[in-house]
Image (cartoon, coloured by chain):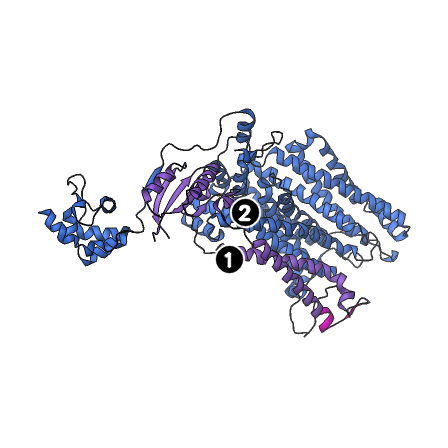
Chain colours: A purple, B blue
Amino acid sequence: MSSKIIQAMYNDDDILMDAVKNVRAASHHIEEVYTPFPVHGLEKAMGLKDTRIAITAFIYGCIGFIFSIWMMNYMMIDQWPQDIGGKPSFTFMQNMPAFVPVMFEMTVFFAAHLMVITFYMRSKLWPFKKAENPDPRTTDDMFVMEVVVDGNENELISFLEKTGTVEIKVTEKH
Amino acid sequence: MSSHYEAPIRQPLIIGDKSYHDITVEVAAPVEGKANKLWWTVFTIALLAFLWGLGSIIYTIGTGIGVWGLNKTVGWAWDITNFVWWVGIGHAGTLISAVLLLFRQKWRMGINRSAEAMTIFSVVQAGLFPVIHMGRVWNAHFVLPLPNQYGTLWTNFNSPLLWDVFAISTYLSVSLVFWWTGLLPDFAMLRDRAVKPFQKKIYSLVSFGWSGRAKDWQRFEEVSLVLAGLATPLVLSVHTIVSFDFATSVIPGWHTTIFPPYFVAGAVFSGFAMVNTLLIIMRKVSNLEAYITKQHIELMNIVIMITGSIVGCAYITELFIAWYSGVEYEQYAFLNRATGPYWWAYLLMMSCNVFSPQFMWFKKLRSSIMFSFIISIVVNIGMWFERFVIIVTSLHRDYLPSSWTMFSPTFVDIGIYVGTIGFFFVLFLLYARTFPVIAQAEVKSILKSSGDNFKKYRDEGVPNPAPVILAKAKTEVSKEDLSANAQNLMGTIGVFDKETQTPDNLKLISGVGPKLEQNLNSLGIYSFDQITKMTEKEYNLLDSLLTTFKGRAKRDDWAGQAKNLKK
């Protein structure tokens, strides 16, 4: 198995989109695409699966909701029911309306924070993490497509040259 | 190109002939450049105000809140007025980034970063007031449901003040992660541009190693959308819950079911006014007029006009309901607001909040930068007085006429308030010099649909400003990873000098074809002389450099063959 990859650089998102479609149509394997901003439709063109991060947010929200119910029931009803201002806390259902704001806030808190943490973990983003974009220009105005060399390298290079690339770099897989 | 189509009637959101690189350069410029004298002057004033506030806070904590102007009747005054004022201002940021994202409003891109920064900084100011008001701030953790030495004594979840703790802290922390997640690609841009090692290190640290992979962007967009969906009800809940601090009480003028929507509208109103105040200055100072356009300011003025009118309706509804309810305490509270000793505060509130935004119906006025700036200041003053009217005039004449009194702030009250304004501007000015103040990645994504030059290209047929495909690509084969091995190999077998020596026909070695010869040449091996010097070690090095034909050199004894061919 070859470990060589070709990095083709593009200077425009529309040219990149066409190139991605052409490369996929020629059944070459696109290892990765680095872009300076979200290019709409790129993940579809690359054939990436839909992200499931919204589903995790829903699950986390449910956990936060259940946790808030458990917490307030434990603290206000179970452990030390008190008569505060003539409003006794003896059953959960009687007190429930007063718990709604905190239930809502905890649901949002859990969903938002745990989803963002999941995103950071899945995309390997955290402090002291080294950036892995192949060229500093990919955060400015350049788009890099990495294609795995499988078979004839020169043929692939000349194929990529025809897709409108401005720079081609052959490198080892990192 | 049709995918970038936008109706010609829509105003461009990026002015001038910009390319992606121009956006990078112009957003990075305030960070990479040096601060001018004006910045230092304003920063110094803000810092002095902040220090005065800090001194006042320390004095308050050291002596007790008796140093404030509060008395037995007016137990809440400037502290809570300032708290609600700052929280209200903190509503525009999330509204712009979340609600406008859900509505797919492209004009949010130019202003969302600064609006979110403003949100976070003003919620920080807001949070200070209840904490100081506790008196014994070292016991501030008592507001959290933490296990403690009293065994099973927990916080009271029936109390709207505790709901507020949850609402404000959720709002602050969620706004912060929303802001920071959006900042990652822009910090990465600054990181990749940074020349000095210190800056590079800092921006590498804060960009969390953002690399801009397609999958990262896909998740980034989904996370932004879900966070917007979560933050929208959150932002509405926060000021709703702040209003519960009043609405769940039995004080005439506070016990009002209209409070939640009325507070939220007021919060959005004051928040947008503050965004206008800040951005009108910033676009000028940081040369960002191309991204924060007149169109942006006009649209914000429309939001100010609408929310101001909602607030006006709420004021009138309150008055009507007080009369219609037939409750004389309620009626007196409102009569006292308008005609009592604090009539001037009521008049300021009414004229600043209800009257002044109505000027925005005129296109000429709402598209005037100077006029927008003045109105934005007027609205902020008006919204401060709204909270003052609600809090102080409702309290100062309570159920017992013998305890009726007036409130006058002490220099400590004033000091803390001015101090938070100073602190806010210290944070905002530092932000303006170190953060990418425009969400440049998102702005780039709308350049082709909403950029002036691209719109002209589609609507008027001027040449396409998009980059063109170059005739010849620059191709380079990187040897960096193998350079050590290649150097080792060349060290023992000797470097071939193309100028003085003639390459041998390596295909004469049995087992070497045209493809392999090419590969060897690309490694710098051209002559039999070089190959004769190969031993076991060199064969291994060669294998590491060749991706195919591994082990063939040794098997076919190239060195021996080359020795014969050389003769």
- Crowding near pointer 1: few (<14 within 10 Å), some, many (20+)? few
Task: Provide the residue designation for mark 2.
Answer: B430
Above/below status of A103 relative to B481: below
User: Is residue B556 found inside the magenta-colored segment of the image?
Assistant: no
Q: Please tell me which residue is depicted at 54% across the width and 47% down the height of the picture.
A: B430
- Can you give x and y, in whole percent of width and height, for residue B86 in the image? 67, 50
Element under disc 1: helix
Q: Is residue B545 left or right of residue B312?
A: left
User: Is residue A82 found inside the magenta-colored segment of the image?
Assistant: yes
Above/below status of B313 relative to B483: above
Point out the stretch of residues depicted in magenta: A75-85
Task: Say which of B218 and B137 sits in front.
Answer: B218
Task: Say which of B42 and B145 sits in front.
Answer: B145
Q: Is residue B23 left or right of residue B112?
A: left
Instruction: Name the chain letter of the residue that bears numbered label 2.
Output: B
Q: Give the residue type at disc 1.
A: Met
Q: Give the residue type at disc 2.
A: Leu
- Can you give x and y, in whole percent of width and height, for residue B519 in the image? 25, 46
Residue B244, quarter of the rendered image:
bottom right
Above/below status of B280 relative to B244: above
Instruction: Name the chain letter of the residue that bears numbered label 1.
Output: A
Q: Please tell me which residue is depicted at 38% across the width and 40% down the height of the picture.
A: A160
Q: CA distance from mark 1 to mark 2?
A: 30 Å
Residue B500, quarter of the rendered image:
top left
- Can you give x and y, in whole percent of width and height, for residue A98 in the image? 75, 61
Element under disc 2: helix
Task: Say which of B68 and B119 sits in front.
Answer: B119
Task: Provide the residue designation for mark 1.
Answer: A121
Q: Is residue B372 left or right of residue B158?
A: left
- Can you give x and y, in whole percent of width and height, for residue A136 in the image? 42, 45
- Crowding near pointer 2: few (<14 within 10 Å), some, many (20+)? few
Q: Is residue B261 left or right of residue B496?
A: right
